[in-house]
Amino acid sequence: MKLRQLRYLVEITKQQSFGRAALQLRVAQPALSYQIRNLEDELGVQLFIRHAGGVVPTDAGKSLYHDAIDILARVEQAKANVLKTQHVVQGHVSVGMIPSACLAFGQEIVDMLAAELPGVTINIAEGFSSHIEEWLVSGEVDLAVFYPSASTSVYEVQPLIEQTLVLAGAFNDDKLPETISDFETLMKFPLVSSTRRNKVRKLLDAAASKHDISLPIAIELDSLPAIKDLVIRGGRYAILEPLAIYREVQSKLIKPCRLVNMGMSRTLYLGWATSGPLDKSTREVARRLERLIPRSCAANPMFTDIGEIDISVATAI
């Protein structure tokens, strides 16, 4: 029994005529009759009764007609399912992400990817940039949202957003202006800071050194939550990257003061290994990270969207 024979039987039953069915199917009537005769021989039953006005199905023909309708519908559905899989991105993608970015965008990224790429399993691995670099090189993560330490041929990066560092104070602090553009003003605020091994601290020290000054750091802590807690309590301030206080600013716990024209900014990058071409699922996740992170920051003056990633880069995404 062939699908073609079932299609012929269905059309003949609908048209109640071999001639009309042949026209509808665009096949020669003798070929149509031949296929039905072969089907009858195979099954050992008569499927149609011929009369002057056309044909009517026998009981066996009626039974096969209903089964044929179901079979042909299932075949079409199977075809549609196969075609659908060609457009569904499937796979597993691991993304290394620094803690501040994870806090700022982690949940939003997970929600967006679940909605737009339901066939892709996402794993977000939180870690410091130095660890993420190692994971990227070793293949433990497919993509990275981080601060790369230096240019390298082992992985490639594209900028996502540039962050102007901010002086963070308690939300209700009336002494904190919207912007500060000189170190003389900045020196009036007692600072809580990370130790000198921290990259943001190194950036601060380098900027201060250019102006031959020493920042008024009263407390050193290598704990971002502890630094933010002291700031929220009031009376102490911290110079931080905007991502570090992204949620606290939204929750009206911390007030940011932009440090403009002071040479203190950091750029967040999207990175991927150059060991080989990325698969489709990784490319699609990269495109969405490139879109989501700048978009989330677009209305915030603490951030600058510095352009779209070139998705066409052959060695990358």
Image (cartoon, rainbow, N blue to C red):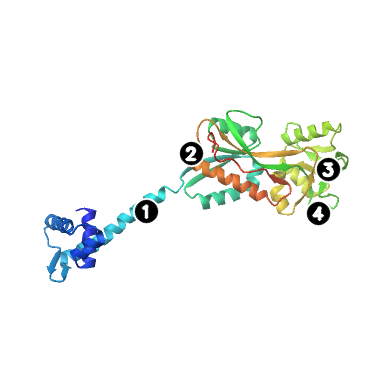
Count the numbered circles shown: 4
Q: Residues within 10 Å of mark 1 (few under 14, many from 20)?
A: few
Residue at the limit of the structure toward the bottom, as seen here: 53
The residue labelled by disc 4 is 172
Q: Name the amino acid, label 1.
A: Ala
Q: Name the amino acid, label 4.
A: Asn
Residue visible at 11% across and 58% down? 44
The residue labelled by disc 2 is 279
Q: Which mark is residue 181?
A: 3
What whole-number distance in Å separates the C-alpha atoms at marks 2 and 4? Answer: 49 Å
What whole-number distance in Å separates the C-alpha atoms at marks 3 and 2? Answer: 45 Å
Q: Name the amino acid, label 3.
A: Ser
Q: 105 or 251: nearer the eye?
A: 105
Residue 10 visible from this viewpoint: no
Query: First in sequence: mark 1 or mark 2?
Result: 1
Query: Residue 63 appears at what percent x and percent y?
Result: 20, 64
Query: Are circles 2 and 4 on residues that touch, CB within 8 Å?
Result: no
Query: Are circles 3 and 2 on residues that touch, CB within 8 Å?
Result: no
What whole-number distance in Å separates the C-alpha atoms at marks 1 and 4? Answer: 59 Å
Query: Residue 213 appears at what percent x and percent y?
Result: 86, 33
Residue 99 falls left or right of residue 83: right
Q: Quadrant of residue 132?
A: top right
The residue labelled by disc 1 is 80
